[in-house]
Amino acid sequence: MATNFLAHEKIWFDKFKYDDAERRFYEQMNGPVTSGSRQHVSPMRQVEPPTKKGATPAEDDEDNDIDLFGSDEEEEDKEAARLREERLRQYAEKKAKKPTLVAKSSILLDVKPWDDETDMAQLETCVRSIQLDGLVWGASKLVPVGYGIRKLQIQCVVEDDKVGTDLLEEEITKFEEHVQSVDIAAFNKI
C-alpha cells in the first residue's frame, strides 16, 4: 500500500536523469568542465557547473556584427530611398507655400512737448507724417502732465524686422521745435 501511494506522488525519483541532461546541455554550450571544479548538487549525482569559455577575436567580431534592431543602413532599399526623397520634396514645397509669420509689436509712445504753448495738433501732424515701411499709426490722445502741459500718447504697430524703437524715437525727435522727448509707455508683441 505504501508503494501504491508513492506511485501516484510527483516525487523526482529520476532526478539524476534531469541533472545529466542539464550537464550535457551546458557542456555542449560551453565545453567540458575540468573535474576539479565540479559542484555538488545532490547526494546521488555530481553535476558539473557551467563554465565560460573565452571567445576568440573572430567570434567577438561576429557578435558585434549582429544588428538586433534591424537598422542596417547599408542595405537600404533604393525604392525606400526614392520614396523618402519624394516625401521630403513634397514637404518642402508645402512649407514654402505657407506664408511666413511676420513678428509685429504694438507700441504706445509718450511724446512730450517743450511747454504748454506748443501746438499739440501740429505736433500730432508732425509725428503722423513719419512714414516707414512696416509702420502703421493708430489712435492718439492728449494726456495732462501738469501745470497745463499735455503730452501726446500715440499708438503704432511696427514690423519688428523693419522698424526699431530707436529709429522711431530718432525720427520723432527730429521735430525739435515741437518735441522735447519721446518715451515708450507700453510695448507688446503681437
Image (spheres, helix red, strand yellow):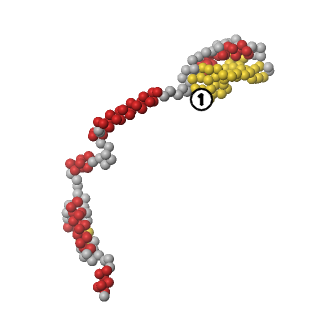
- The answer to whether one can see residue 82 in this image is yes
Give the residue type that dot 1 points to.
Ile
| Residue drawn at 34 percent across, 35 percent down | 83
Left or right of residue 117: residue 154: left
Using the image, determine if residue 92 lies above or below residue 60: above
Residue reaching furthest bottom? Answer: 1
For this rendering, which residue is in front, 70 or 120?
70
Q: Is residue 20 above or below residue 173?
A: below
Can you name the residue that lies furthest to the right here? Answer: 147
Q: Is residue 141 left or right of residue 130?
A: right
Residue 5: x %, y % from top left: 32, 84
- Placement of the C terminus among the 4 image quadrants: top right
Across and down, in percent, residue 153 comes to 70, 22
**Residue at disc 1, secondary structure:** loop
Q: Which residue does the image show at 77% across and 19% down from the upper left? A: 149
Outermost residue toward the top? 177
